């Protein structure tokens, strides 16, 4: 009887150990699944904001491409007319830069630059301009130039529908960074140093390892974390937990270049979000004053 009792105890203990082992495996798997889901949702929020900003830039570019004064400036080869008109445009539209290019892809007028750039050839490193001239269709992307930012380019056509140049709306990433704060998210965009001879305006920006910080304004705590842990850029793990934060390193592409750098997305390790009800519709509404009607060329509906 005693042997049967001991055997029962041993079997019970073994069963409990097996249950405990499987429970721990399940709990670990469940926790990992929750973390991955949490990270995926935050990456989706980032991507949606990037796409919204691109659509907004493209709509503005299309709108400005219809400006008769800019067309007149190109046809008369008079950049001064374009510069004056761009100043008028920027009184009503904030936080963008505008550049106009000639039909042979040379610099014509820049809203932010008064240096001697007129006539500079751009086709060798501005892939977006080449695409727009070839297709006569608008194009938006994250593109490397003297800076790395969102560039929306639209063709400028004369009355006979001939290509006479193009206009470009340039936007940085500050609007996106500000919107991400609603989700307790921080982002930092980094450019690989091998492209700094193109992105010459970033040469004096701070560096982390071999990467230049694209924005002159950045989160100091995130900067310190990355300085201390440069191995993160090797991307040997899908994400990194540093104290109270999770960091994800996302490859960043520029048109015509496979990997130009990284977006570092930083989120709270504790999965709480006071703006969890903040939907994609809310994001679209923030920049939804302009919407491009894809069914017709170069037409913008202002809502």
Image: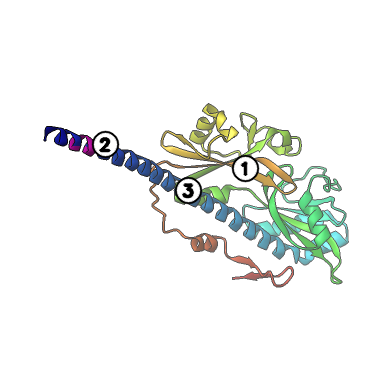
Per the image, the residue denoted by label 2 is: 14
Between 90 and 182, the residue placed more toward the observer is: 182
Residue 217 is drawn in which quadrant? top right
Number of the front mark, 3 or 2: 2
Q: Position of residue 190 (x, y in %)?
A: 62, 38
Q: CA distance from mark 3 to mark 2?
A: 50 Å
- By secondary structure, the bulk of the magenta-drawn segment is best described as helix
Task: Work out whether 146 lies above or below 91.
Answer: above
Q: Residue at x 22, y 34 (%)?
A: 10
Per the image, the residue denoted by label 1 is: 251
Per the image, the residue denoted by label 3 is: 181
Between 297 and 92, the residue placed more toward the observer is: 297
Q: Position of residue 197 (x, y in %)?
A: 76, 35
Mark 1 or mark 3: name the one nearer the start of the chain.
3
The crowd level at tag 3 (other Cα within 10 Å; few <14, some 14-19, many 20+) is: few
Left or right: residue 7 versus residue 131 is left
Mark 3 or mark 2: name the one nearer the start of the chain.
2
Left or right: residue 24 versus residue 151 is left
Q: Are marks 3 and 2 in contact (CB under 8 Å)?
A: no
Q: Position of residue 249 (x, y in %)?
A: 56, 40
Q: Residue at x 68, y 42 (%)?
A: 259
Numbered range of the magenta stretch: 8-12
Q: Are marks 2 and 1 in contact (CB under 8 Å)?
A: no
Mark 2 or mark 1: name the one nearer the start of the chain.
2
Name the element at disc 1. strand
Task: Work out whether 16 lies above or below 298.
Answer: above
Name the element at disc 3. helix
The crowd level at tag 2 (other Cα within 10 Å; few <14, some 14-19, many 20+) is: few
């Amino acid at each position: 009887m005693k042997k049967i009792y001991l055997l029962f105890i041993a079997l019970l203990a073994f069963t409990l150990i097996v249950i405990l082992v499987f429970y721990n495996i399940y709990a670990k798997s469940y926790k990992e699944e929750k973390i991955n889901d949490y990270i995926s949702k935050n990456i989706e929020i980032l991507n949606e904001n990037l796409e919204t900003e691109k659509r907004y830039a493209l709509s503005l570019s299309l709108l400005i491409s219809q400006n008769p004064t800019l067309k007149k400036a190109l046809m008369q080869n008079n950049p001064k007319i374009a510069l004056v008109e761009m100043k008028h445009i920027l009184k009503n539209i904030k936080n963008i830069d505008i550049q106009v290019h000639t039909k042979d892809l040379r610099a014509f007028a820049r809203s932010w630059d008064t240096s001697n750039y007129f006539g500079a050839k751009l086709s060798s490193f501005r892939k977006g301009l080449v695409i727009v001239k070839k297709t006569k269709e608008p194009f938006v992307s994250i593109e490397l130039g003297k800076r790395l930012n969102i560039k929306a380019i639209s063709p400028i056509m004369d009355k006979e529908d001939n290509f006479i140049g193009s206009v470009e709306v340039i936007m940085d990433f500050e609007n996106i960074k500000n919107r991400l704060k609603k989700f307790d998210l921080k982002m930092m965009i980094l450019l690989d140093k091998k492209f700094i001879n193109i992105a010459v305006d970033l040469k004096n920006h701070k560096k982390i390892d071999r990467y230049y910080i694209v924005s002159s304004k950045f989160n100091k705590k995130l900067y310190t974390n990355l300085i201390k842990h440069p191995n993160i850029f090797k991307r040997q793990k899908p994400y990194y937990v540093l104290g109270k934060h999770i960091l994800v390193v996302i490859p960043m592409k520029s048109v015509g270049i496979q990997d130009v750098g990284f977006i570092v997305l930083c989120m709270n390790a504790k999965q709480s979000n006071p703006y969890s009800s903040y939907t994609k519709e809310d994001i679209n509404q923030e920049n939804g004053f302009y919407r491009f009607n894809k069914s017709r060329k170069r037409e913008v509906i202002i809502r």
